[in-house]
Image: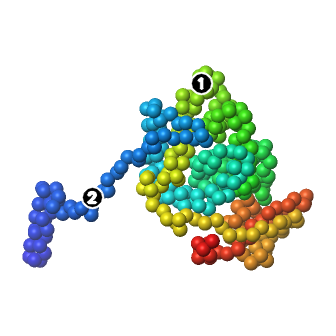
């Protein structure tokens, strides 16, 4: 019992000394936090060929804010960076075929992080298209099929929407802003403020930040190392290998269909997220392209 009291007293004395001295003698270089650096902004920047007026303090600081936020959202930013290797090769040629500037691929990242997310308003897919807009632009949306989740078709619909917006505004930066606020929302502010330059419009906070977020994403994708993201070519996700089956009849059970095609229900849905139920009614003989996985092996993907 005496030994316990003795060593206990010694322990209290040591703790007291550390408290008095602040324990600074125990600090080592390995415990110090790494320096936090302010992301460097480019000397000049363009969106869809249109100059960003970085010479104005409010524009500069707005872009800097989005660069800081996205540079330090390490896990989230790293994941969508990796996904660009898989999905940009799908998006880019569709934008080009519709004569939509390539920079709009960054809008898809801003909208969804290249994931099939659902917004509180019910917008879905990479391009976050609302159901009414989807139907207006030719996408099928019902209990069994939702083509907002079919990347090629959703990108084509987004292209038609963007072109219609350009026909209205004749300015790609305003087109991008209107994708967030809606055409009527931007037109209302243009009329109210007698101003046609996005960078001079007073907008709600979400839309006011929206184009700057797209610009920040563009900077990080084009120069990831400059913002602390070090990726080799092998770190980017590769396109998923598949072949397409054209189906013009009803599929009563997609689980059975998957097995007949030497794959699983899980993988069938992963490659075809637009299939929303366990069956595919098709009384009108519509031609659907269903992707069938070629392989699940990571090594084969890396070799292609």
Picture coordinates of residue 135 (x, y %)? Answer: 78, 46
Above or below: residue 148 compared with residue 269: above
Which numbered disc covers residue 195?
A: 1
Q: Position of residue 117 (x, y in %)?
A: 62, 54
Depth check: give the residue in front, 282 or 139.
139
Q: Quadrant of the C terminus?
A: bottom right
Q: Which quarter of the rendered picture does the N terminus lie within?
A: bottom left
Say which label, 2 or 1, has the lower sequence index: 2
Q: Is residue 294 left or right of residue 70?
A: right
Q: Secondary structure at mark 1?
A: loop
Report the front residue among 135 and 179. Answer: 179
Q: Nearer the viewer, mark 2 or mark 1?
A: 1
Q: Which residue is mark 2?
A: 32
The CA span between labels 2 and 1 is: 50 Å
Name which quarter of the figure residue 278 lies in: bottom right
Task: Relative to 203, say whether 223 is above or below.
Answer: below
Q: Nearer the viewer, residue 184 or 230?
A: 230
Q: Position of residue 84 (x, y in %)?
A: 58, 58
């Amino acid at each position: 019992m005496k030994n316990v009291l003795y060593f206990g007293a010694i322990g209290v004395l040591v703790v007291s000394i550390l408290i008095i001295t602040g324990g600074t003698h125990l600090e080592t270089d390995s415990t110090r936090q790494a320096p936090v650096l302010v992301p460097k902004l480019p000397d000049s920047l363009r969106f869809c060929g249109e100059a960003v007026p970085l010479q104005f303090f409010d524009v500069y600081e707005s872009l800097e804010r989005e660069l800081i936020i996205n540079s330090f959202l390490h896990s989230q930013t790293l994941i969508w960076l990796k996904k660009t290797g898989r999905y940009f090769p799908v998006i880019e040629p569709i934008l080009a075929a519709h004569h939509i500037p390539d920079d709009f691929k960054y809008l898809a990242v801003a909208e969804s992080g290249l994931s099939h997310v659902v917004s509180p308003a019910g917008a879905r897919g990479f391009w976050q298209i609302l159901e009414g807009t989807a139907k207006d632009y030719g996408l099928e949306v019902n209990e069994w099929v939702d083509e907002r989740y079919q990347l090629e078709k959703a990108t084509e619909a987004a292209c038609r929407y963007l072109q219609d917006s350009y026909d209205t505004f004749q300015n790609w930066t305003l087109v991008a802003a209107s994708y967030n606020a809606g055409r009527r929302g931007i037109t209302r502010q243009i009329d109210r403020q007698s101003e046609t330059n996005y960078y001079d419009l007073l907008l709600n906070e979400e839309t006011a930040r929206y184009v700057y977020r797209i610009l920040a994403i563009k900077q990080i994708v084009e120069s990831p190392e400059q913002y602390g993201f070090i990726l080799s070519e092998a770190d980017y996700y590769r396109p998923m290998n598949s072949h397409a089956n054209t189906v013009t009849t009803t599929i009563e059970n997609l689980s059975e269909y998957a097995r007949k095609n030497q794959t699983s229900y899980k993988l069938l849905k992963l490659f075809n997220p637009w299939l929303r139920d366990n069956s595919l009614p098709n009384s009108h003989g519509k031609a659907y392209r269903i992707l069938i996985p070629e392989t699940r092996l990571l090594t084969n993907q890396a070799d292609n």
